[in-house]
Image (cartoon, helix red, strand yellow):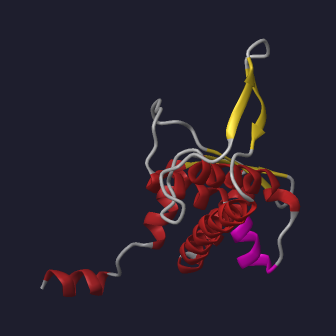
Amino acid sequence: MTIIPRGRALGLTVQLPIDEKHTYSKKYLLSRISILYGGWMAEKLVFNEITTGAGNDIERASDLARKMVCEWGMSEELGPLAYGKKEEQIFLGREIAQHRDYSEDTARRIDEVVKKVILDAAAATEKLLADNIDILKAVAGELLEKETINLEDIDRIIGELRKPEPEKVEAAAA
């Protein structure tokens, strides 16, 4: 992971693929949604305000949650069903429309479940960041100083802030 600031308060997080994957678990996808809400939630926690900076992240998280519910059957509430038949134009080689093959009531339920997925992920992100606000502020400080940091920098910061105090190490050893 590399974090690159853009401007005074804008930033970009790039997550490099570890390997090529074609199937993902529900747990992994929920983690991805939480990650996408990291910047938005950090703004909310630190500045008590949100900006348009996380717009693309919110769009991507919403799309991912909707796919989990409507395409991949990852919803306990709606079950392992596919909602919405894709219509593709062969000559274009891509999807251009989605046919709704479910009722208005089901559409409302889909929206509720997608919203719950998003809100649960955002709440998990908020708790993680609030519990580790010292790390968040230290990473932000390093970004202001260096402009670009990578995973090794983040690991170093966490290691420095989470070093056990000598008296606690001695007590645990005894």
**Residue at image coords 47%, 57%:** 155
| Relative to 67, 95 lies left or right | right
Residue 28 coordinates in the image, percent (x, y): 47, 52
Q: Is residue 141 visible?
A: no
| Quadrant of the image containing the C terminus | bottom left
**Residue at image coords 58%, 54%:** 69
**Residue at image coords 70%, 63%:** 111
Residue 151 coordinates in the image, percent (x, y): 52, 49
Location of residue 132 by image quarter: bottom right
Residue 40 coordinates in the image, percent (x, y): 74, 65
**Residue at image coords 68%, 44%:** 84
Any magenta on residue 173? no
Q: Judge by depth and name the residue closer to the eye, 40 or 68.
A: 68
Location of residue 96 by image quarter: top right
Q: Judge by depth and name the residue closer to the eye, 116 or 36.
A: 116
Principal SS element in the magenta part? helix
Part of the protein shown in magenta: 40-48
Q: Judge by depth and name the residue closer to the eye, 51 or 71.
A: 71
Q: Judge by depth and name the residue closer to the eye, 84 or 96.
A: 84
In this figure, what is the number of numbered marks?
A: 0
* Placement of 129 over or under 86, stated as above or below: below
